[in-house]
């Protein structure tokens, strides 16, 4: 059967002092599975449980971060629905890839939120499949339930790989006094990119790219 399944276990430590004046430790695991709905549609499911610790908070950090220092557990189930009619998953020149992600936390644990993201990436060949136009768009939202706020480790962030030209977490709400990035509950982002040959041997796999990224991140509890 065309069925995938996996088990994940992880422990990670992130130094977020430059962006938000704290360190984050994540420890947990997940089980996941996926299966096709048709030739181009695929469905995936995942359950994860993790312990998330905000520590080493700088004494000059935003009070919105100092108030969230400590440990918090998350028990969540999520799904990912995808549509893919690209001609290649590694080096696409034509076709559409779309996704819809949703996650609900509150099956035990401390976190209680519902989040969703939807987006598409469309590839258009312009000249002999050597010049490719790629346009991408994505929107997302997260909100708490049962009178729970969305915490800093659960919010969305933009910058770095998700919005080129900005530092990691370089876009969105900040504490005006400390400059700490606080994340956001809503976002949109997009990209328009042109890929073209540079006249180098094809086996080198080197191409030119001209792009413009845009987006915004806003609102927080």
Image (cartoon, helix red, strand yellow):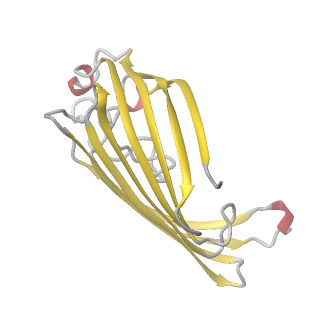
> Residue at (50%, 32%) from the top-left corner?
30
Q: Residue furthest bottom?
A: 127
From the top left corner, tell me how far across and down residue 14 is, in percent: 48, 26
From the top left corner, tell me how far across and down residue 61 is, in percent: 29, 22
Image vertical order of residue 8 relative to residue 194, above or below: above
> Residue at (68%, 67%) from the top-left corner?
88
Q: Residue furthest left?
A: 147
User: Is residue 155 among the parts visible in the rendering?
Assistant: no
User: Is residue 25 among the parts visible in the rendering?
Assistant: yes
Indicate left or right for 193 with 153 as reference: right
Quadrant containing the C terminus is: top left
From the top left corner, tell me how far across and down residue 220 is, in percent: 22, 41
- Quarter of the image for residue 183 reads top left
> Residue at (65%, 54%) from the top-left corner?
1
Image vertical order of residue 4 relative to residue 154, above or below: below
Q: Nearer the viewer, residue 83 or 122?
A: 83
Image vertical order of residue 182 relative to residue 62, above or below: below
> Residue at (78%, 62%) from the top-left corner?
205
Q: Nearer the viewer, residue 80 or 120?
A: 80
Count of residue discs? 0
Indicate left or right for 68 with 164 as reference: left
Image vertical order of residue 206 relative to residue 47, above or below: below
Indicate left or right for 216 with 9 as reference: left
Q: Residue furthest front?
A: 1
- Quarter of the image for residue 144 reads top left
Q: Nearer the viewer, residue 51 or 136?
A: 51
């Amino acid at each position: 059967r065309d069925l995938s399944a996996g088990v994940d276990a992880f422990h990670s430590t992130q130094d977020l002092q430059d962006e938000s004046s704290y360190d984050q430790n994540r420890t947990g695991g997940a089980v996941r599975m996926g299966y096709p709905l048709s030739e181009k549609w695929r469905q995936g499911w995942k359950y994860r449980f993790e312990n998330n610790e905000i520590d080493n908070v700088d004494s000059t950090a935003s009070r919105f971060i100092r108030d969230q220092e400590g440990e918090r557990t998350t028990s969540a189930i999520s799904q990912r629905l995808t549509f893919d009619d690209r001609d290649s998953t590694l080096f696409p020149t034509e076709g559409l890839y779309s996704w819809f992600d949703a996650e609900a936390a509150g099956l035990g644990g401390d976190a209680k939120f519902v989040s969703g993201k939807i987006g598409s990436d469309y590839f258009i060949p312009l000249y002999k499949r050597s010049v490719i136009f790629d346009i991408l768009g994505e929107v997302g939202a997260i909100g708490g339930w049962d009178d729970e706020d969305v915490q800093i480790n659960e919010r969305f962030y933009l910058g770095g790989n998700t919005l080129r030209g900005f530092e990691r977490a370089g876009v969105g709400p900040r504490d005006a006094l400390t400059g700490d990035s606080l994340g956001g509950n809503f976002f949109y982002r997009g990209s328009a990119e042109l890929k073209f040959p540079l006249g180098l041997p094809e086996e080198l796999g080197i191409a030119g790219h001209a792009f413009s990224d845009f987006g915004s991140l806003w609102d927080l509890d």
